[in-house]
Amino acid sequence: MEKLKSTIKKNSELNYSQEFEISQLHADKNYVEFQRKKLKEIMPNASMEDIDRQIANVIARNNSVDLIVAGIYKHFDINIDNDDVKAFAERIKNNVLNDKNGNLSNDTMKKMVEDDKTLQDIATSTLKRNLLFNELAALWDIRITDDDVKKSLDNYYQKTNSPIRDILNDKNKFESIRQIMLNERISIELLNRFKVKFNFPKQPDKKNN
């Protein structure tokens, strides 16, 4: 990750016995449709039931990671620098608006980044999470090497035939891919280290209505 003015420091030990509970799943409707579209492209022969099941798994996973992250922020002192937020905001906006193939964004995301307040909120949240995940990577000795990034890009090229040369030749884009891969590794580690319990309210018996 590039040198930032923002800082993070662990102020207390993480409690790995802490249990998190989810009573309701949250997902943006446009995000769900975006995922459904991408899954249909990847698995054209899959049934609607299989696609819906995969989407439900993604939503449950994202909700679980978000809950854990929110719960462990208290163990860290984080200082967010305004210049870093501006830089993140500009990068996010450029990535979304220049995503011609719809690989990373949709119309809703494009509208969101065109609103300055929303874009600032997204940039701040992204910066804060990146700081946390990089700190956890150091704490848990998790690394993404240059070779890891190159192999991932090569696999992406083999599957999609989409060009990757611009990413390989652009340090910022290359580092963005490394951060995405690191965030994914840390997300998996969070789910392995902390317990998440799903406790959904029972649905009323329709026969009694």
Image: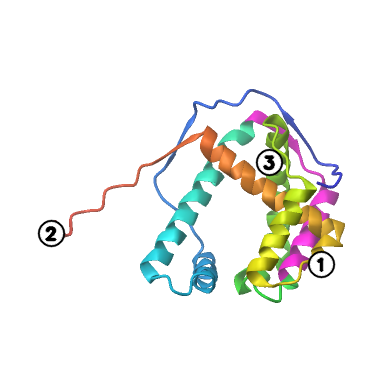
Task: Measure the C-alpha gap from mark 2 to mark 3.
Answer: 48 Å
Residue in the picture at 51% in, 34% down: 194
The 10 Å Cα crowd at callout 1, few under 14, some 14 to 19, many 20 or more, is: few
* Left or right of 126 in this view: 204: left
Residue at numbered disc 2: 207
Q: Which amino acid does label 1 sit on?
A: Arg
Q: Where is residue 121 in the image (x, y as percent from the top left)?
A: 69, 55
Cβ–Cβ below 8 Å for labels 1 and 2?
Answer: no
Residue in the picture at 62% in, 32% down: 74
Image: 27 above or below 94:
above
Q: Residue 145 carries which label?
A: none
* Left or right of 11 in this view: 190: left
The 10 Å Cα crowd at callout 2, few under 14, some 14 to 19, many 20 or more, is: few
Which label lies toward us, 1 or 3? 1
Residue in the picture at 77% in, 59% down: 89
Residue in the picture at 39% in, 70% down: 48
Q: Main secondary structure of the magenta part?
A: helix
Image: 72 above or below 34:
above
Q: Which of 5 and 184 is in front in this view?
A: 184
Secondary-structure class at tag 3: helix
Q: Position of residue 40 (x, y in %)?
A: 49, 72
Residue at numbered disc 1: 165
Examine the rendering and report whether any part of residue 105 can be seen: no
Cβ–Cβ below 8 Å for labels 2 and 3?
Answer: no
Q: What residue type is labelled 3?
A: Phe
Q: What's the magenta region?
A: 75-96
Q: Position of residue 41 (x, y in %)?
A: 54, 73
The tag earlier along the polypeptide, 2 or 3, is: 3
Q: Does the magenta stretch include residue 133?
A: no
Examine the rendering and report whether any part of residue 140 can be seen: yes
Q: Residue 133 carries which label?
A: 3
